[in-house]
Image (tube, rainbow, N blue to C red):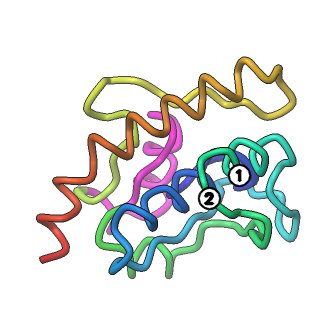
Amino acid sequence: MVCEGNICRSPIAAALLARELPHLDVQSAGTHAHVGESANPVAVQLADERGLDIRTHVARLVTSAHVRDAQLVLTMTRAQRGLIETNYPHAKGKVFRLGEYDAVDIVDPYMRSPFIFELAMSQIEQGVSRWLEPIARLSH
């Protein structure tokens, strides 16, 4: 899972996907990560409310190795997808938006209202649910 800062959206999305498909190694990173920072407190609270624990998350920058080793890279926005495909041309064909099936970018809640965090959370939950079957097929 890839987002911008790796402190809000992608840690939640990774935790949610890992809970749904526990046999997979699900990781998250950011295109412009707040390297070394913990998850945003509002993101931690929203995750807690859903039985997800992202308290130990530490933000990191997406690397060529992450992209190379991943079977699938899910970004939060079309721009992030383009950035990954531009910076790592070998990734073409395995990079998609989390909201691909609904043709939606996951809104960035960083430094925004609790309402926007809730909106992002609901978009992430929808995106993960849409990807469960395709990922399950890919991983078998």
Q: Quadrant of residue 20?
A: bottom left
Q: What's the distance in space between the residues labelled 2 and 1, CA to CA?
A: 5 Å
Q: Amino acid at mark 2?
A: Leu
Confirm or deny contact between disc 2 and disc 1 (CB under 8 A).
Answer: yes
The image shows residue 41, relative to residue 122, as above or below, that is below
The x, y position of residue 132, in whole percent, is: 26, 53
Residue 82 covered by magenta stretch = yes
Q: Which residues are magenta?
A: 73-92
Residue located beneath label 2 in the image: 52
Q: Looking at the rendered structure, which numbered label has been put on residue 48?
A: 1
Kind of residue indicated by mark 1: Asp
Q: Quadrant of residue 136?
A: bottom left
In which quadrant will I find the C terminus? bottom left
Q: Position of residue 93 (x, y in %)?
A: 22, 56
SS at mark 2 in the image: loop
Lateral position of residue 61 relative to residue 72, left or right: right
